[in-house]
Amino acid sequence: MDYNSVYQKKLTTPEEAVKVVKSDSWVDYGWCVCHPVTLDKALAKRMTDDSSLQNINFRGGISLWQPEVTQVPDAEKRISWNSWHASGIDRKLIQNGIGFYIPLRYSELPRYYRENIQHIDVAMFQVAPMDKHGYFNFGISASQIAAVCDIADVVIVEVNKNIPVCFGGFEEKVHIDNVTMIVEGDNPPMGQLPSGATSEIDETVAKFIVSEIPNGACLQLGIGGMPNAVGSLIAKSDLKDLGVHTEMYVDAFVDIAAQGKITGINKTIDKGRQVFTFAAGTQKLYDYVNGNPEIMAAPVDYVNDYRVVSSIDNFISINNAVEVDIFGQVASETSGVRHISGAGGQLDFVLGAYASKGGKSFICCSSTIKMKDGTVKSRLLPRITPGGIITVTRTNIQYLVTEYGMVNLKGSSTWQRAEKVISIAHPDFRDELISEAEKMRIWRASNKR
């Protein structure tokens, strides 16, 4: 089959391609780094030039730059930006009334598309250049993209030579036969998500967690400074023969691999492979994963499935929290009604790690947060801020870690939980937390103060 001739027949300009978008359309932008760039600009220009285009609804996730379509005239009246997981960009769109969060359990996302959404008017996203077999690789955003292609009326791929090719095994690519149109973009550099400098608090929390990780463990690191701090400390540690099976692949894994600590030889599945469903970081990450046979990009309904996670021995899951109350409830998506991020795969990894032979799950956070007005607020609260969303229930949390220590809440009664959580709160807030615990009748006279 001469796929090059098929390619030329389907090749078109961005301006021509976006003409398929009509009023009331649902347009899917894929996920994170692979959101379209050239197509997004062309569609935004068309919408700017044609005010009759109304009520266009978009889906995306973890935006690393603000989509041009969210900046068209009267955007708040003409579009909705619907995010599966909020980055800082998505969060601002939500706060400005343009964006909305779609509640999800990330491991179920491909099924959401195939069984519940069932129809997309147009899907457009960046891909790596076509290979000799006619396939476009999804690069570092396997996630749910195959499912998106399955149900979209129109699939437009925006080819970017800078997208790394990530090998997988299934649902990490789309064949040209299933592509409607091809656009060759401007080959913009990959969106960057630097991990940022770790704080002294991050490093203290990391030390508690790393002390609990055995040789041969399989790692999952969540989004944020603390999980990255754990990764940095692991890279400097004496740990060896580690494996990787993680929702998000971040720079810390590259640092750990550079020290020769990742072999994956003890993994019970996908032995020797570093498995993830999407990645975002700096150029060193993109260079490392490109064409690397050790890397395995797979759909999220495989990577995040707690049954898959639980089948891997010594699974270590490390994730952040926004708030935790003295019952052990974890809010990782919101602060009250203010949206922060999303559920992602946190619950699946908490469940899967605990069910893993020798596995452990860690929820970590700083004990306090400094507010915009300069006041300091405890992240450990008597109860989650009203309106807050519970991501991990009190029955599922295992280890909770702050800079003041680490506690295991499994098997603890309400008064034991209160005592343990308060013991790792900032000292300035402990008396207040004890007083509230007494009011809620979850504090005993024999509790340690």
Image (tube, rainbow, N blue to C red):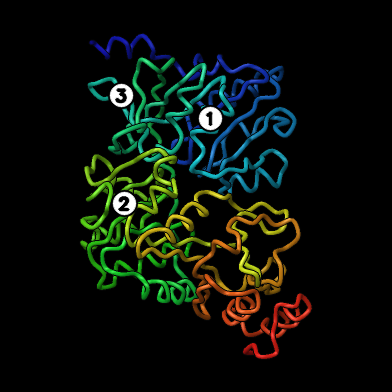
Quadrant of the frame with the N terminus: top left
Q: Position of residue 78 (x, y in %)?
A: 71, 27
Q: Amino acid at mark 1?
A: Tyr
Q: Is residue 414 above or below residue 261?
A: below
Quadrant of the frame with the C terminus: bottom right
Label 2: which secondary element: helix
Q: Residue at x 56, y 36 (%)?
A: 67
Count of marks, rendered view:
3
> Gap between marks 1 and 2, in whole Å?
33 Å
Label 3: which secondary element: strand
Q: Position of residue 215 (x, y in %)?
A: 26, 68
Residue bearing mark 3: 135
> Gap between marks 3 and 2, in whole Å?
25 Å
Residue bearing mark 1: 113
User: Residue 68 occupies which quadrant of the picture?
Assistant: top right
Q: Would residue 76 be seen by someone viewing this image from the given angle?
A: yes
Label 1: which secondary element: helix
Q: Amino acid at mark 2?
A: Lys
